[in-house]
């Protein structure tokens, strides 16, 4: 088998499964582990993949901070569909915490006017709920992060100690089955952890592009999550890992399907 043929097969496997392992590739392609490592190094130099310990994934998993205005333009229809699915979980008299991000903003847009209480640090979430008079909004305060339109502070964390809610809807920057949930800001991560402590159930809203990615600050381990709502772009390999840890996963179809 030629070098080009090995590289083609490696990239096909990466696109299918999202990650590859040196040992598995060595057995499949019938070459030494040393040869596979060299192949992966070459492909990384060409920016086709990102080397990890013992294998590779499809691109750099580390996330740079982006403005809300930029994030809003990314996969808006998928976020809307995730928001609609999340809204099916709501009932009158719910006490919710809604975190920050454009996916949870899309969810807030889908919430019908009904008697409930919403606690949030995200200004864009509050604005989406303002024209729904039966929803009581509790706005957490602090320094506003321009990249998330969300307030972060020790004051916000302390406020949450006085509340007990039945559901938290959490948006994240990255989900990795081994590393956990993460965001690009350590203050946001601290606030998210406080939100989880104040809620009975944590529901993560994230499109499939967030999987296999890592932000600067870890929020929690993956097994601390109760439910994830995502799209059908999620690989079967990752889906199996999540379900093996007892996490409920709801899949919405991609728009083109």
Image (tube, grey):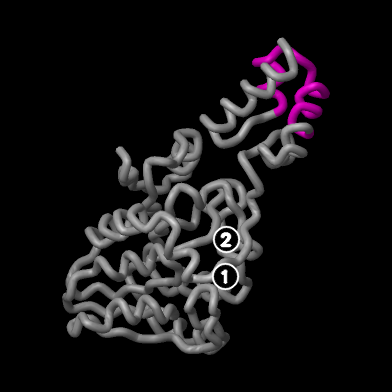
Q: Say whether residue 100 is left or right of residue 186.
A: left
Residues tagged 2 and 1 counted as in contact (Cβ below 8 A)? yes
Please report the bounds of the magenta region as a residue range.
22-41
Q: Residues within 10 Å of mark 1 (few under 14, many from 20)?
A: many
Query: Which residue is rendered at x = 34% and y = 44% of the image?
Result: 254
From the top left corner, tell me how far across and down residue 83 is, in percent: 31, 60
Q: Which quarter of the picture shows residue 165?
A: bottom left
Residue 36 visible in this rendered orientation of the protein = yes
Q: Say whether residue 219 is left or right of residue 196.
A: right
| Residue 160 sits inside the magenta stretch | no
| Residue 33 sits inside the magenta stretch | yes
Task: Identify whether 54 is placed above or below 192.
Answer: above
Residue 170 visible in this rendered orientation of the protein = no
To which residue does mark 1 refer?
189
Kind of element beneath mark 1: helix
Q: Nearer the viewer, residue 87 or 7?
A: 7
Query: Which residue is rendered at x = 61% and y = 62% of the image?
Result: 218
């Amino acid at each position: 088998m030629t070098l080009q043929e090995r590289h083609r097969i490696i990239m096909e496997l990466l696109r299918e499964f999202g990650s590859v392992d040196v040992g598995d590739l060595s057995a499949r392609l019938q070459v030494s582990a040393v040869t596979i490592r060299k192949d992966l190094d070459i492909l990384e130099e060409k920016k086709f993949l990102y080397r990890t310990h013992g294998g590779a994934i499809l691109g750099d998993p580390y996330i740079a901070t982006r403005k809300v205005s930029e994030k809003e333009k990314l996969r808006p229809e998928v976020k809307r569909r995730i928001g609609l699915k999340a809204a099916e979980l709501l009932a009158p008299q719910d006490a919710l915490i809604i975190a920050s991000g454009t996916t949870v903003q899309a969810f807030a847009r889908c919430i019908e006017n009904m008697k409930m209480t919403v606690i949030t640090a995200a200004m864009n979430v509050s604005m989406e709920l303002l024209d729904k008079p039966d929803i009581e909004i509790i706005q957490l305060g602090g320094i506003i992060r321009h990249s998330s339109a969300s307030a972060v502070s020790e004051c916000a964390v302390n406020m949450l100690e006085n509340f007990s809610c039945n559901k938290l809807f959490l948006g994240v920057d990255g989900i990795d089955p081994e590393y956990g949930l993460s965001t690009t800001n350590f203050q946001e991560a601290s606030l998210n952890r406080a939100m989880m402590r104040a809620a009975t159930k944590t529901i993560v809203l994230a499109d499939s592009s967030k999987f296999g990615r890592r932000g600067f600050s870890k929020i929690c381990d993956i097994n601390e999550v109760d439910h994830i709502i995502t799209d059908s772009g999620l690989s079967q390999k990752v889906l199996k890992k999540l379900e093996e840890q007892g996490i409920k996963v709801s899949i919405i179809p991609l728009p083109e399907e």
